[in-house]
Amino acid sequence: MGGLGTLILANIALAVLFASVWSRVDLWLEEHRFALRPVGLGVAGGLSAIAAMMFPLHVAPGIFTDLRTAFIALSGLIGGPVSALCAATIGIVYRVSLGGMG
């Protein structure tokens, strides 16, 4: 399997990892700190967005995409606006630290 197939599999694995981490974090926060549940999902989504930025899919020369927005949107869908804000902040800070366009 070539480069594109490997990157697609890596992104699918990231999505599965996000779901696994979130289920564990959700169970723990539900028992111990229910009020921090949205923040926990936001952190998990933000870290998943960072991992997604490490495996971009190259569409054309100089043009690439990744799944960071999917992880941030999923965090917001499941955890609400606080979760989306946490995930987006983590993703934005990492993207700005990378520099460059986009």
Image (cartoon, rainbow, N blue to C red):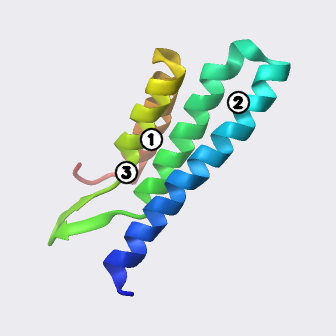
Camera-side mark, 2 or 1: 2
Tag 1: residue type?
Answer: Phe
Which residue is disc 1 drawn over? 71
Checking the image for residue 67, the label placed there is 3
As drawn, 101 above or below 11? above
Which residue is disc 2 drawn over? 26
Quarter placement of the N terminus: bottom left
Tag 3: residue type?
Answer: Leu
| C-beta proximity under 8 Å, tags 2 and 1 | no
Camera-side mark, 2 or 3: 2
Crowding around mark 1 (Cα neighbors within 10 Å: few <14, some 14 to 19, many 20+) is many
Crowding around mark 2 (Cα neighbors within 10 Å: few <14, some 14 to 19, many 20+) is some
**Corner quadrant of residue 96:** top left
Q: Secondary structure at mark 1?
A: helix
Q: Image point 56% across, 45% down: which residue? A: 47
| C-beta proximity under 8 Å, tags 3 and 1 | yes
Residue 49: give x, y in percent of width and height.
46, 46
Q: Secondary structure at mark 2?
A: helix
Q: Image point 22% across, 51% down: which residue? A: 101
